[in-house]
Image: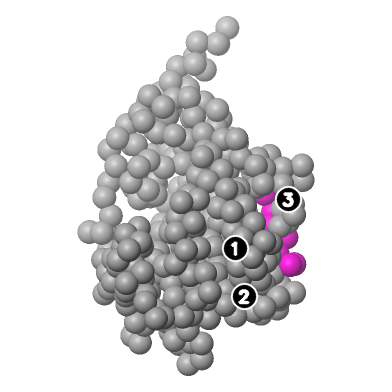
Amino acid sequence: MKALFIGGTGTISMGIVKRLAEDPQWEVYLLNRGNRSDSVPAGVKQIVADIYNEEDAAKKLEGMEFDVVSEFIAFDVSAVERDYRLFKGKTKQYIFISSASAYNKPAANYVITEGTTLANPHWEYSRNKIACEEFLMEKYRKEGFPVTIVRPSHTYDERSIPVGVHGDKGFYQVIKRMQQGKPVIVQGDGSSLWTVTFNSDFAIGYTGLMGNRHAIGEAFQITSDETLTWDQIHKTIADALGVEYKPYYVTSEFLSSTGKLYGYDFEGGLIGDKSVSVVFDNSKLKRLVPQMTTNVPFHKGVRMSLDYILSHEDKYEEDPKYDEFCDKVIEAMENAKKAVRP
């Protein structure tokens, strides 16, 4: 069977590509700009093209057909419209990566299923994913376009660590603050529930949907079965670093409003996502992919990540802007406490 990955070297997709590269049943192709060729597993074929240059991509794909086309880098309707033009009649299954952030925030029930309403007034990213889903499902209903929707939540790999709040350069400054003995900002009171999934576990669920006719015209969420509070997530990171966990709790609303002064848009990522408790019911996925399970719980995954990150610190950049923001927020909160004392 032949699979084409649009992208294929990101956090989620690389875990899937690595898994398929070891499966003799699959012939794997990547279509991307070739910027991370050194990380591509042996045996995987590369088509070097920019998918956003539709004319060039069409030439590179001319005469090719696939059992599965996997889209990882479409973030608005124009991108899936392009894919529809490129792959209509040329694939038996088109799998679109949406997002669990597309679910209503907050939902009527913290237990999330694929039937939970899609609506996110706080985050344009999520609204765009919803619009992509609607376009593709309309093509399925009217024309039989063989779409499968996949909604990941917070997926990570050995190159990254999930944290609640961070700056433009990602999680690394949060790790540095922990190492330096500084408090780290945690949204809310740290008790909201969250799910993090290692990419090799995600790959089990995803590859089980590939080529599966029961998945056509359906949506699936793929996450770990492990649910943690944000305090537990950050405390596990601190334990793995061998440092004391010093949380500083700040409401998401305050972070959203003050973050704008530094150019941060925390409304989508916090109010529209991470600050809301969610627990994912994966029973629909497991009916099709019974082997789906959590092999890498967070206390193991975070150590795998830190082993890589701390031995490749030249690949990561400190973020003095975010560090200053944290210090300013904490100072302001402490001054407010002093101001209300009798």
Q: Which mark is drawn over residue 116?
A: 3
Between marks 3 and 2, how big is the CA–CA gap? 21 Å
Check residue 150 in the rendering and tell me which mark sits there, or answer none: 1
Q: CA distance from mark 1 to mark 3?
A: 14 Å
For the residues marked 1 and 2, what is the alpha-carbon distance in whole angstroms? 9 Å
Q: Nearer the viewer, residue 102 or 324?
A: 102
Q: Nearer the viewer, residue 210 or 340?
A: 210
Q: Which residue is mark 2?
A: 209
The residue range painted magenta reads: 277-284
The x, y position of residue 149, in whole percent, is 61, 62
Q: Amino acid at mark 3?
A: Thr
Q: Position of residue 74 (x, y in %)?
A: 46, 56
Tell me the residue at 57%/77% (across/down): 92
Amino acid under disc 1: Val
Instruction: Residue at 44%, 59% (x, y): give it.
Output: 82
In the picture, the quarter occupied by the C terminus is top right
Q: Is residue 106 left or right of residue 55?
A: right
Q: Which sits earlier in the primary sequence, circle 1 or circle 2?
A: 1
Q: If you read the primary sequence from the N terminus, does the residue marked by circle 3 or circle 2 appear first?
A: 3
Q: Picture coordinates of residue 306 (x, y %)?
A: 39, 62
Under mark 2, the amino acid is: Leu
Which of pointers 1 and 3 lies earlier in the amino acid sequence?
Answer: 3
Number of marks drawn: 3
